[in-house]
Amino acid sequence: MNSDVTVGRAIIRTQLWLTAVFATTAIYAAVVFNTTAQWVGAVTAMVLFAVGVAAFLWAFWTAVQRSRTEDISVTQLFLLVGEPTPATVRRPMLIALAVQVIVATATALARPNGPDGSPGSSLAVGFLVPMLGLGLNGLWAAIHGRFGERARRAD
């Protein structure tokens, strides 16, 4: 098996699995749209947002430590742009992030009003979930990305 695929496999699997959990619960909440379904969708979205924030902070802390000796950009870290991230990792991670954005948008637009007709819906909480994708992308890159050496200034 290609070493690029095995490096950080747990983070990649977590990203894919949690994206599937979000898509399932958000679509369930949009289709059924009763109080229980809305709670399931909203609580799932908030938990995934919290996991994303924790992963984002862990990634940021790790990247700051590495940036003392390595040249790391924000786009390389959270959007997996460029050489530090192999395509075999970049592709599934960015697809999962895109699915999070698409599901959040589609489910919120499908039910823009509450069950009683009032404006707003608990499904809008799904817009917080892409923080999960950004956080896990950053975590993978901060731990496993191969960045270039930081240029030394001649002071």
Image (cartoon, grey):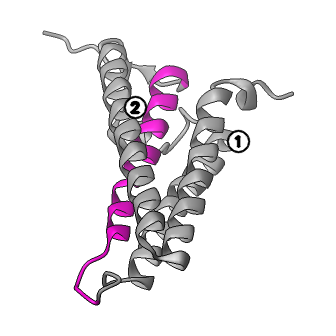
Q: Is residue 114 above or below residue 83?
A: below
> Mark 1 — residue?
88
Quadrant position of residue 31: bottom right
Residue 117 pos. (x, y %): 28, 90
Question: Which residue type does callout 2 highlight?
Answer: Ala
- Residue at horizontal 51%, vertical 54%? 97
> Mark 2 — residue?
55
- Residue at horizontal 39%, vertical 76%? 108
* Whole-number angstrom distance, CA of label 1 to CA of label 2: 21 Å
- The N terminus is located in which quarter? top right
In this view, the residue in front, 38 or 145, is 38
Magenta stretch, residue numbers:
117-144
Q: Tell me if I can see residue 150 in this picture.
A: no
Query: What kind of element bears circle 1?
Result: helix
Q: Does 143 appear in magenta?
A: yes
Question: Which residue type does callout 1 highlight?
Answer: Thr
Q: Does 47 appear in magenta?
A: no
Q: Is residue 56 left or right of residue 85?
A: left
Q: Tell me if I can see residue 131 in this picture.
A: yes
Question: Farthest right residue?
Answer: 1
Q: Is residue 78 left or right of residue 90?
A: left
